[in-house]
Each structure stands twice: as structure tokens, then as C-alpha cells.
């Protein structure tokens, strides 16, 4: 019932706003323009950001099942494919900042983020592995000076602040907040294959002063980043099925309208089989997402790398691409020329291959987890021969596969 109630709440409270955001999506996609900042402010004022966030931030403290159902409905209703991605990034960063418990960080950043008044982005990727990160944080007074270059920043062109990871002199990673208005910060647009309405950007830092009160994680930034990416995987697994559902329904509507051999295309057995495969792709994705959400709500998920959540992200990504492929095959010219949504979603879903841990590297890590010797356990998520969810992922030292899952080639 929680899922249905959450979906209905999204439709009733934010349906019109989500339609407004999606109205200009096709035009903005062709020009590479992100949603106007005022739409995020409107969403924050309407309480959309706060659904997932704790009461201390003015939120409703929704559990993973409720938030996941809301994200799926947002993905279904909003025709801007990047909006649920951006929304989930904003709320994830707000939550991570609030988790520090530092009053200044909470009041100056987490609260405005929760209200849509401060737009955050993740500055992590820079074309190296984590132990070769070139962005440097050099001690300066009680804070740091940051210099380096970050790539592939989703939402960077509309961001007020960047959650930035940098290597310190002692070889650790530090996480801190860099404001777009800080001296020495340069934000430039990135013209990519997909996510064209996500405001992708690059960030160049030149001796940027970051005071101590803007440090989110002074030590073990690696675990901090891994925790964030783990939550990103669940968000992807949650909102993408809504987009898949929208594409399936649009495809079926078009197939009923189109005539071949004197009958509707939808009456042809080969077309029915294709639609059946699309339906299987959708429902298996939803099942995996629901399983991961319930797994988190039970307190069974590992915060750094969780196999169930990671498997859900992997499955949803593969099935989203399979569904789009079937749509192009049965609709032909309509998908290619007639309705820009198919191309938009296909491009953006390809981006998920690298998002929050590449598909092949997730497979390596999942294989490492599944390949451990099974042990008897009473945990409801385990049985003989299954992945041991009660076994924490090693952090220091990490296995090569565990480290590779967090290479910085992700959104």
C-alpha cells in the first residue's frame, strides 16, 4: 500500500509541476539546456525534495520503499529524463551533508538544498583511479587550498556548490564543499552524447580556499564517496522503471494506431512478442528495485557496497536499454524521427552504463561477493549458497575488484 500511496501523492501534489518541467524537455535537449533553476526552487518549495529527507531538514523522512515509489512515479510523469536524476543527486548530497551533524553545514547547506534554494553537484571524476587522484587539497590554516580538474559533473552548469573529493598530503581523500562563486573556480559546459538536459560540466580549481567549516569528511573520504555512490545506485534503480513504463505505454499506443496488412500492428504475433519482452524488462526491473528498497528498510544493506542494491542498478540499466531497443525495432521511423523521447531516453539510459559504478566493474564486485564461501545464517535475505550480506566489504586494504568499482568514470 505504501507504494500506491506514494505514487498517488506524487500525482496529486506535484503532477502539474512535473508536467511543466517536462513540457520544454525536447527543445532543451536539442540545445543542451538544463531545467531552469527556478523549477528546482519551485519543487523545493512544494516539498518534493523533502519527501526523502529527515524531519530536521523539514522533510518527511520517507523510508526507501516510499521514496523509491515516488521516484518511479516522477520518472513516469516528468518527460525531462534528467530531472529525476538531478533531484535524486540533490537530495542524496543534502542527506550526506546533514549526516555530518555539523550545525553550520546543516544550516548553511543541507537546509537550503532541501528547499531547492541551493543546487549541489558531485565533483568526483577526473580520469584516474582513487589512489592517483590529481586534485590536491593542501593544508592552509585550518582549511585547505584545492587545485585540480574534475570531469563529468552531472548538473554542474546549474550548481551553486560542489561536493568535491581531493587527495591530501597524507594520501587520504577529503570531501568538502566548493562554491561555484569561490575565487579560482571555473565551470565550463560539456557537450555529451546524452544527459543533455542535465547540465553536464567540468570544474577547474586553482588555489581555491576552502575553510574548515566546509569540510564534510576530513578523513576516509573513500568510504564517504562509496557510501554516496551506493545510494546513487538505488536511486537509479528506482526512477528508471518509471521511465520504462512511460515508454512502454507510448509504444503500445502507437502500435494500436499503425496498420499493416489491414490490421493494427499490435495484432501481429511478432509485435506482441516484442511488447511481451518489453513488459518482462519492466517488471523484472521493478521487482529488483523493490527488493533493494525493502532490503535497505530492513537494515540489511551494507552502507559502502551492497550486493542487492548494486545488482538492482545493474539489472535495471540492462533492461532499460533492452526495452528501448525493442521500441525502436517495432516502431521504426516513428521512434527515430517522429517522437524525440525515444532518442532522448535511449541516450540517457546508455549513460547509466557508467553511472555510480560501471556495469562490468559491478559484475566483478558482485562476483567477489557471490564467490565467498557460504556460511549458515538466519538472515532473511540469505540462504545456503547465496551472497553473504552480513559480511562487510573490506575497506583497508580493499581488494582490487572493490577498488575498481569506485573508479571515477561515473556520474
Image: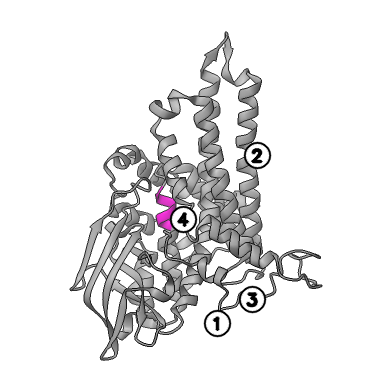
Q: Disc number at residue 280?
A: 2
Secondary structure under tag 3 reads: loop
Task: Tell me the distance, in whole angstroms, between the alpha carbons under discs 2 and 1.
Answer: 40 Å
Task: Tell me the distance, in whole angstroms, between the alpha carbons under discs 3 and 2.
Answer: 33 Å
Q: Is residue 184 positioned above or below 258 on the image?
A: below
Task: Tell me the distance, in whole angstroms, between the alpha carbons under discs 2 and 4.
Answer: 24 Å
Residue closest to the eye, 350 or 403? 403
| Residue 134 falls in image quadrant | bottom left
Residue closest to the eye, 15 or 378? 378
- Residue behind mark 1: 396
Q: Colour scheme used in the picture? A: one colour
Tell me the mark number nearer the camera, choosing from 2 and 1: 1
- Please tell me which residue is depicted at 47% across the width and 52% down the height of the picture: 352
Name the quarter where the C terminus is drawn: bottom left
Q: Position of residue 66 (x, y in %)?
A: 58, 57
Q: Is residue 139 positioned above or below 79 on the image?
A: below
Tell me the mark number nearer the camera, choosing from 3 and 2: 3
- Residue behind mark 4: 354
Query: Are discs 3 and 4 less than 8 Å apart at CB?
Result: no
Structural crowding at the residue carrying mark 4, measured as other residues with C-alpha within 10 Å and reported as few (<14), some (14–19) or many (≥20): some
Amino acid at each position: 500500500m505504501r507504494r500506491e500511496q506514494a505514487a498517488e501523492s506524487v500525482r496529486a501534489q506535484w503532477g502539474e509541476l512535473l508536467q511543466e518541467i517536462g513540457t520544454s524537455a525536447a527543445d532543451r535537449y536539442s540545445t543542451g539546456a538544463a531545467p531552469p533553476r527556478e523549477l528546482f526552487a519551485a519543487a523545493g518549495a512544494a516539498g518534493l525534495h523533502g519527501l526523502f529527507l529527515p524531519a530536521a531538514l523539514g522533510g518527511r523522512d520517507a523510508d526507501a520503499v516510499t521514496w523509491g515509489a515516488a521516484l518511479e512515479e516522477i520518472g513516469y510523469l516528468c518527460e525531462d529524463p534528467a530531472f529525476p536524476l538531478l533531484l535524486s543527486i540533490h537530495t542524496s548530497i543534502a542527506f550526506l551533508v546533514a549526516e555530518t551533524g555539523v550545525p553550520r553545514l546543516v544550516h548553511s547547506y543541507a537546509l537550503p538544498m532541501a528547499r531547492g534554494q541551493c543546487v549541489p553537484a558531485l565533483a568526483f571524476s577526473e580520469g584516474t583511479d582513487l589512489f592517483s587522484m590529481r586534485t590536491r587539497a593542501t593544508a592552509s590554516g585550518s582549511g585547505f587550498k584545492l587545485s585540480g580538474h574534475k570531469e563529468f559533473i552531472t548538473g554542474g552548469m546549474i550548481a551553486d556548490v560542489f561536493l568535491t573529493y581531493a587527495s591530501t598530503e597524507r594520501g587520504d581523500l577529503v570531501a568538502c564543499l566548493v562554491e561555484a562563486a569561490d575565487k579560482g573556480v571555473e565551470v565550463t559546459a560539456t557537450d555529451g552524447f546524452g544527459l543533455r538536459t542535465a547540465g553536464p560540466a567540468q570544474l577547474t580549481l586553482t588555489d581555491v580556499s576552502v575553510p574548515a567549516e566546509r569540510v564534510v569528511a576530513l578523513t576516509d573520504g573513500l568510504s564517504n564517496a562509496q557510501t554516496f555512490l551506493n545510494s546513487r545506485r538505488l536511486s537509479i534503480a528506482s526512477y528508471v522503471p518509471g521511465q520504462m513504463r512511460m515508454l512502454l505505454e507510448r509504444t503500445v499506443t502507437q502500435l494500436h494506431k499503425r496498420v499493416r496488412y489491414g490490421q493494427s500492428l499490435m495484432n501481429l504475433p511478432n509485435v506482441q512478442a516484442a511488447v511481451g519482452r518489453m513488459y518482462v524488462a519492466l517488471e523484472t526491473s521493478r521487482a529488483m528495485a523493490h527488493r533493494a528498497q525493502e532490503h535497505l528498510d530492513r537494515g540489511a544493506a551494507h552502507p559502502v557496497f551492497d550486493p542487492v542494491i548494486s545488482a538492482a542498478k545493474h539489472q535495471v540499466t540492462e533492461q532499460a536499454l533492452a526495452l528501448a531497443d525493442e521500441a525502436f525495432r517495432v516502431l521504426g521511423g516513428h521512434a527515430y524521427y517522429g517522437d524525440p523521447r525515444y532518442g532522448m531516453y535511449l541516450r540517457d539510459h546508455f549513460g547509466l552504463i557508467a553511472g555510480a559504478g560501471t556495469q562490468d566493474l559491478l559484475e566483478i564486485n558482485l562476483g567477489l561477493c557471490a564467490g565467498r564461501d557460504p556460511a549458515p545464517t538466519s538472515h532473511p535475505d540469505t540462504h545456503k549458497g547465496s551472497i553473504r550480506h552480513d559480511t562487510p566489504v573490506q575497506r583497508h586494504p580493499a581488494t582490487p575488484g572493490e577498488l575498481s568499482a569506485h573508479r571515477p568514470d561515473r556520474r
